[in-house]
């Protein structure tokens, strides 16, 4: 039936079969409808113009909000919309007791790295939001550059380090230089997360940017892209199999593998 329909009705039906309107994100659905309505023979040009202006104005507002959140200044609070102010204020105040406690330990520098990680994360979310709002699909390289940031590891790890008294400033500096082993962890976590979230994101009308950009760039199917990503799953499986936490208890889980790979050689 669908192949026999004419556009724009055909496009509406095809879209509805993939993404039910009542389960979609309103602003995304609005953008799609504007594009479809433009193809109507009896379209109202004035209505289209106002609809586009409305969409662009709200998009500009969202971008401005994201830019403000990426700063670290309580002077920005009055410029934020009312609904964002309590959250932004709470984030700023979160680090006050941390700073006081760390100063007593002679480690006042530690919170700086966590805060910088959070600011970088906000900027990363801003870039992803632009792709989403504008409907753009970046190259896989561009995606990975931002996706590694929004994996949250760059914020979570220095935040965890704040609570470890033996971690010194040079350790934070080492992290900030993003050594290869650190980045490799980001990549694995990012791509595995992309596999897990693919169905959920596409069902709600969102671009599953990681998988889709890889598919487009390499001319492969969804299944082939996920198979490539799943190659990285093996390391995670070995680390957490049988309900064990290999990162927390490396002596029990990972030590035998490390010894087998890097220390114990075969007798010949």
Image: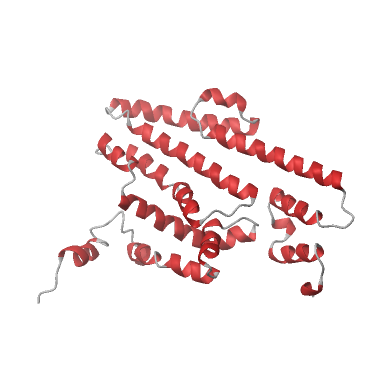
Name which residue lies at 74% across and 63% down.
16
Question: Residue lying furthest right in this view?
Answer: 42
Q: Position of residue 130 (x, y in %)?
A: 59, 45
For residue 166, above or below residue 4: above
Q: Position of residue 2 (x, y in %)?
A: 78, 72
Q: Nearer the viewer, residue 259 or 163?
A: 259
For residue 78, above or below residue 127: above
Image quadrant occupied by the C terminus: bottom left
**Total marks drawn?**
0
Q: In which quadrant of the rendered view does residue 202 lie?
A: bottom right
Horizontal side, residue 15 vs residue 238: left or right: right
Q: In which quadrant of the rendered view does residue 60 lie?
A: top right
Q: Nearer the viewer, residue 149 or 193?
A: 149
Visible residue check, residue 240: yes
Q: Position of residue 208 (x, y in %)?
A: 57, 58
Q: Position of residue 10 (x, y in %)?
A: 78, 66
Name which residue lies at 64% across and 61% down.
203
């Amino acid at each position: 039936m669908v192949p026999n329909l004419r556009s724009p009705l055909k496009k509406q039906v095809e879209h509805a079969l993939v993404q039910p309107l009542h389960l979609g994100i309103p602003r995304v659905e609005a953008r799609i409808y504007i594009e479809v309505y433009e193809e109507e023979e009896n379209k109202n040009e004035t209505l289209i113009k106002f609809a586009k202006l409305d969409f662009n104005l709200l998009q500009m507002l969202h971008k401005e909000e994201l830019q403000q959140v990426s700063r670290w200044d309580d002077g920005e609070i009055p410029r934020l919309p009312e609904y964002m102010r309590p959250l932004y204020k709470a984030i700023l105040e979160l680090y006050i007791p941390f700073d006081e406690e760390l100063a007593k330990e002679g480690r006042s520098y530690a919170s700086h790295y966590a805060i910088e990680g959070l600011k970088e994360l906000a900027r990363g979310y801003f870039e992803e939001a632009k792709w989403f709002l504008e409907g753009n699909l970046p190259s896989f390289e561009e995606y990975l550059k931002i996706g590694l940031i929004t994996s949250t590891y760059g914020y979570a790890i220095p935040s965890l380090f704040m609570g470890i008294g033996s971690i010194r400033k040079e350790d934070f500096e080492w992290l900030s230089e993003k050594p290869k082993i650190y980045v490799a962890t980001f990549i694995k976590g990012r791509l595995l997360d992309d596999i897990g979230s693919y169905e959920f994101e596409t069902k709600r009308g969102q671009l599953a940017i990681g998988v889709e950009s890889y598919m487009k760039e390499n001319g492969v199917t969804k299944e082939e892209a996920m198979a490539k990503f799943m190659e990285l799953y093996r390391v995670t499986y070995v680390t957490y199999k049988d309900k064990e936490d290999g990162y927390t208890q490396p002596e029990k889980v990972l030590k035998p593998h490390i010894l087998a790979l890097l220390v114990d050689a075969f007798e010949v």
